[in-house]
Image (cartoon, rainbow, N blue to C red):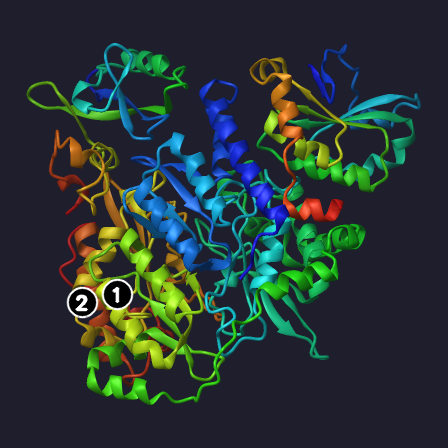
Amino acid sequence: MYRYDEFDAAYVKDRVNTFRGQVNRRIDGSLTEDEFKPLRLMNGLYLQLHAYMLRVAIPYGTLSSRQMRALAMIASKWDKGYGHLTTRQNIQYNWPALKDVPDILDALADVEMHAIQTSGNCIRNVTADHFAGAAADEIEDPRPTAEIIRQWSTEHPEFLYLPRKFKIAVTGSPNDRAVTKAHDIGLRMVRNDTGEAGYEVIVGGGLGRSPFVGKVVRDFLPKSDLLPYLEAILRVYNLHGRRDNKYKARIKILVHETGIEDLRAMVEREFEQLDGPSVALAEEEVARIEAYFAPPVFAKLPQHSSALEQAKKADAEFAAWVETNTDAHKQSGYTIVTVSAKAIGEAPGDLTTAQMDVLADIAEQYGHDELRISHEQNVILPHVRLDDLRIVHAALADAGLATANANLISDIIACPGLDYCALATARSIPVAQDIQQRFADPVRAKAIGEFKIKISGCINACGHHHVGHVGILGLEKAGIENYQITLGGDHTETTAIGDRAGPGFAFEQVGPAIERLVDAYISLRANDNERFLDTYRRLGLEPFKTALYDNERTAA
Amino acid sequence: MPLVTKDGFQHLPEAAYITVDQLTETDEPWLAVEVAGDVDVSAIAPHFEKISLIAVQFPSFADGRGFSIARHLKRLGFDGELRARGHIIADQYAHALACGFDGVEINDEVAERQPFDQWQDAANKVLPPYRQKMAG
Amino acid sequence: MSKLFKPKIVSANDLFAGDVVYMNPGFGWTRKLAEAAIAHNEEAAADLLAKAMPQQEKVVGPYLADVALDDDGRPFPTHFREKFRTRGPSNRTDLGKQSVNPERREPLAASGGI
Ligand code: SF4
């Protein structure tokens, strides 16, 4: 894992002092609220419906057990005993007081963490594949790239007041778990004809009010050109992105209005003209950063674990969990564990202090001290021995963390919605809870198979509803909450924006509508292995629309 | 508008700024030009010789185009004085200097709320790691 | 005009604690909607907001919100967003105003809520 050097440490500490000063200057009137707002946002601090909210960066979703314990400590000392995992691999505290925030940031700095650029119209916390460094299908670990981008973008003097926020995601695998095509810039590691590793650069993806799938701006970018090329894109965007309308300010609109060909020409021209060597990191520095991400020392283990097989035979519940919540590891004898933060009836992505501590303990004892936060609001233990799965499962179960639902219908993404978020037009969490309850039976959920429901509480789409197999968007209509359903979205390398099914549903009509939809799918699927998404692609919207609207829908 | 320099606020007589369009109409030297955020500055480059001062407008501190314009002007070879002018706050001072501005012309209202020590503090902050490495 | 006018209160968030506050008749701030100053016409509403705007050192983002009045003349929110602001997260009734000050728990029927 990356460790701070003296530069990082000094900077992050100084940054806390700067923010402490900014808070004081807000209070003494040196800064107006209008001026303070972007400054606090660039330090992760929002003002939400009921309280301030602090969004802490978990760069590319990676953290150690020591860091997880610090997050738990902060939750209990300065907040209300829990934190919320976000679709950008961050963690949010919902109740900090303004005066405590500098102290919280100090506590974070003590464990090499911060909340820098988790909000604001700047380059946000960089995200990456949550299976990075562990996945069997990986070309290269994307995290050194993400770390290099983090360093370059941190307080980049030119790019702090962009037209709008700017999100970058990196994946090192052909199977895209980082939603790279729905980011302002997506980087996919690829190899060229000579076998050299580099990036396919995707630009202008994004969800929100007008969703766009990103377009390829460069087929192959050599690794050494990474930062100069990003600098070129950002400069073009900073100068030409629209500033007259907040909803048209993202780079996706610039790409859309300019056309990818012209935009590519602008970027390439800027790239040629800028002084690359003054931007790119020196080779030794790149190597130094890469070295931090060297894989842990794995034991030489056989592919097969007889301890695991025996335990699975003895305990069906455990066997079911192994089947849904583990993935192939590149190292023989190891696996990747997805810890569901979606216990039935709990707010998706919420972790209590106790759960954070348990996760830290497990990672320390059985997981090479590493944890990941996934954009699907779960926790990943990337390196667990097959032999240890039984004991890991037992420890997770004691903490209410062993729900066997990864990728199933109750593994729902839900943004905070109107229960917390000042921008929300409707609630998300209770909608998710209702659906979870309806599909609480693990046998039924398993029979339904992979089924991705994603819920947002407003058009900003933090809950990624456009790319859910089923997307649910909470709006306000005639003074009440109203939910629009989209079908057929896909967040993987075959990214697709879901189709709007029709008129929205009232709050209490959403659950029944989803039940009808699922029943229709079960009766329509070609066989038990055909996922909802595949059935949808085969049959199109019509039969599902009929199922959604056929019944006793009351007026929306 | 007071000018923030490393020695303090300077209250200069208002410079007689001309617009980019007026540049082509004059051959006088020592010109001061004011540039808006939507101007293509490469059009100014042929006139650099007669320009001694370029002020880049900041209509709002949240409009960061000026930072890229400064970089662009520097890259095009402008070596006269470069000022950021308008609504800029102390917290942006280091960023303005890093992008190539020599000084910042701020409005009186901001100068009153944010006395010089706040600008000095901002200029003395620890640089982010990448900047330190590139500088060192 | 007065026939169409919906009574209004000024709400904001406290600068320090971040929680929901309402302007009271003395142009100070209260955490209880029941104690909020009520504007019964456009002019009074504009006046209340004008009193709130300069109080940047105390509150953030003051704005006017519609209320209705119960039989005793006390205000209650009409929009579901404002109802949630008088309470806290609907999925965590142990948190927020509803946990310490369950003053007015109108049913959330209008929002189609739980
Ligand atoms: S989608 Fe809307 S409601 Fe949900 S977190 Fe984002 S801004 Fe808030």
Q: Which residue is mark 1?
A: A410
Residue A46 position by quadrant: top left
Q: Amino acid at mark 1?
A: Ser
**Residue A488, horizontal then vertical, whole percent:** 37, 67
Q: Which residue is mark 2?
A: A440
Question: Which circle's residue, 2 or 1, is located before the other in the chain?
Answer: 1
Specify the subunit that label 1 lies on: A
* Image point (22%, 22%), residue name: C6
Q: Secondary structure at mark 2?
A: loop
**Residue A291, horizontal then vertical, whole percent:** 62, 66
Instruction: Mark 1: give few (<14), some (14-19) or many (20+) Cα within 10 Å.
Output: many
Residue A325 position by quadrant: bottom left
Specify the subunit that label 2 lies on: A
Asked if residue C46 can be seen in this view, the reply is yes
Residues at discs 2 and 1 in contact (Cβ within 8 Å): yes
* Image point (15%, 40%), residue name: C108
Q: Secondary structure at mark 1?
A: loop
Q: CA distance from mark 2 to mark 1?
A: 7 Å
